Image (cartoon, rainbow, N blue to C red):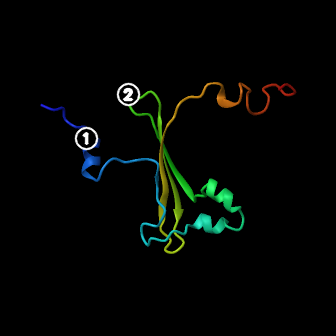
């Protein structure tokens, strides 16, 4: 007798396969337009190279959970924008991160912020 498949895995298989993240959506799910509000609005204000490197988004939804039995928490993020043609708000990128603690704070051991005692750094 084979072991029974876990329920979330069964659901994913039945609904069309595994969820692969990060997932990018290049066009509006409603009308198929590829123009997004933030990119269009910032075209003249930000150089094109910066727009390609850092995708502007209207809002982001973030959810952090510490699953039972796991050592580190997981962060789920959805970056949203609006279709210029029909006004539909849709997810542009869906991501999942496994958060891990950092040692030393990433700043060479130096404390950030104002000094604890004025006049001393």
- Residue 59 location in percent, x, y? 56, 56
> Image point 67% across, 58% down: which residue?
49
> Image point 78% across, 26% down: which residue?
116
Which secondary structure lies at badge 2?
loop
Which secondary structure lies at badge 1?
helix
Task: Tell which residue pokes out farthest to the bottom in this image.
Answer: 85
Reply above or below: 17 against 34.
above
Quote the CA–CA distance across marks 2 and 1. Answer: 17 Å
> Image point 75% across, 33% down: which residue?
113
Q: Quadrant of the N terminus?
A: top left
Do the numbered discs 2 and 1 sit on residues whose CB atoms are within 8 Å?
no
Residue behind mark 2: 69
Reply above or below: 86 against 119.
below
As drawn, the label of residue 64 is none
- Snapshot quadrant of residue 45: bottom right
Q: Nearer the viewer, residue 62 or 107?
A: 107
Q: Nearer the viewer, residue 119 or 55?
A: 55
- Residue 97 location in percent, x, y? 49, 40
Taking 34 as reference, is 112 left or right?
right
Crowd around label 2: few <14 · some 14–19 · many ≥20 (10 Å):
few
Reply above or below: 21 against 28.
above
Residue behind mark 1: 7
Taking 22 as reference, is 101 left or right?
right
- Residue 79 location in percent, x, y? 52, 54
Taking 106 as reference, is 77 left or right?
left
> Image point 25% across, 37% down: which residue?
6
- Residue 76 location in percent, x, y? 47, 44
- Snapshot quadrant of residue 104: top right
């Amino acid at each position: 007798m084979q072991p029974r498949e876990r329920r979330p895995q069964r659901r994913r298989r039945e609904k069309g396969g595994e969820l692969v993240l990060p997932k990018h959506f290049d066009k509006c799910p409603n009308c198929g337009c590829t123009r997004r509000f933030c990119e269009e609005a910032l075209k003249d204000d930000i150089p094109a190279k910066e727009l390609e490197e850092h995708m502007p988004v209207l809002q982001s939804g973030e959810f952090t959970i510490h699953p039972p039995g796991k050592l580190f928490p997981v962060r789920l993020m959805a970056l949203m924008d609006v279709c210029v043609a029909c006004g539909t708000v849709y997810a542009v990128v869906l991501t999942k991160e496994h958060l891990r603690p950092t040692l030393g704070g990433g700043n060479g051991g130096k404390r950030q912020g104002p000094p604890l005692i004025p006049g001393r750094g």
